[in-house]
Image (tube, rainbow, N blue to C red):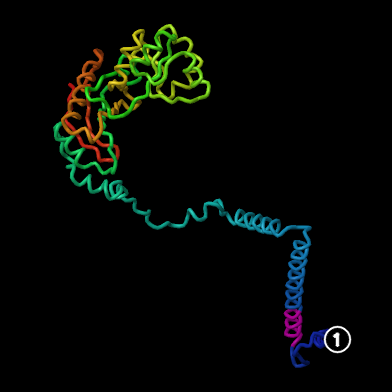
Amino acid sequence: MARKAELLEQAAKLKLDVSAKNTIAEIEAAINAASASAAANDSTKDSGVVAEREAVVAKSGKRSAKALEEAEAKAEKEARKQAGDTTPQGDADAAVKKGPAPKVRPLIERRGKAYRKAAEKVEADKIYKLHDALMLAVETNPAKFDASVEVHVRLGVDPRQADQNIRATVVLPHGTGKTVRVAVFAPEADAAKAKEAGADVAGEEAIVKLLDKGTLDFDVLIATPAYMPKLGKYARQLGPKGLMPNPKSGTVAADVVKAVSEAKAGKVEYRVDKQAIIHLGIGKVSFGVDKLEENAKTFFASLQSQKPSSLKGSYVKSTAIATTMGPGIATENQVN
């Protein structure tokens, strides 16, 4: 009875709804439940106080809000690690199934209206004769200016092999339609002759001044063999722009008058690139089909003469004609 009286006293302090009619076990259970509830309330209150305190600390600058976020992220990471989740947090979005990839429009649809209209006139699977290809190129020129007409030839050579690295020059009978500025690096006597032949700038002093200023205001640089060593220090300046005189291109010449006359008359250099393709402009749309065809045939004859003797297999794989901004037109190979 003393035990029950003691429990009833505790229950009264906790304001529990129990009486002497309840058994000792019932009274103990009620007291234990009330004690557990009170402990939970105290814990919640303490957590709120801590959170409020951390917020105050962050606000005062003793611990930044960013630091608190990093601490929470670290705690979350540790919790996931203990739970056995090893997926990196940055890859969480990657695990979500993504929708279908966006559709990429065909290249022809991304072209301008003028190009698409011109391309509609070119049959995709047809290989045109040279005359017909040039006629179609002139007809389908989408540019509003006098565009260049170009020949693109894919060769079966290996440009890494010295004897298959095609590089040559050809004098087009009707020129290219471009005004060519010619410079001549030679003694004063030869420079005077070069100017009479049509050179735009000539002479050692004049050329050196341009090179020292970095003003490469010319399209072709011709030099005499004796003056080539003097251009050595300008090789890095001239080489990348294709202006360094070279015997293969005919720009290293003792007869500067002939070299200038050929350059002004339409002498052009062509060479194979790393993809084994030769690109060459053969004139302007305004030339008309006949003149363009003569220039093209002159180029193809020159290209035929450059066929390496060591080559095995086809020399020319494909040929195409195109204007500057027009569609490519597959053309019959003119070189065996």
Q: Residues within 10 Å of mark 1 (few under 14, many from 20)?
A: few
- Quarter where residue 129 is shown: top left
Residue occupying image coordinates x 75% and y 68%: 52
- Quarter where residue 165 is shown: top left
Q: Is residue 160 above or below residue 59?
A: above
Residue placed most toward the observer, 230 or 120: 230
The quadrant of the picture occupied by the N terminus is bottom right
- Quarter where residue 142 is shown: top left
Residue 269 point in image, percent of width and height: 31, 21
- Is residue 229 one of those drawn in magenta? no
Residue placed most toward the observer, 327 or 146: 146
- Left or right, 79 with respect to 319, comes to right
Q: Amino acid at mark 1?
A: Ala
Q: Is residue 200 above or below residue 186?
A: below
Residue occupying image coordinates x 30% and y 16%: 261
Residue occupying image coordinates x 73% and y 67%: 51
Residue 220 point in image, percent of width and height: 38, 21
Question: What are the residue bounds of the magenta stretch?
Answer: 23-34
Q: Main secondary structure of the magenta part?
A: helix
- Is residue 28 one of those drawn in magenta? yes
Residue beneath disc 1:
2
Residue occupying image coordinates x 31% and y 12%: 258
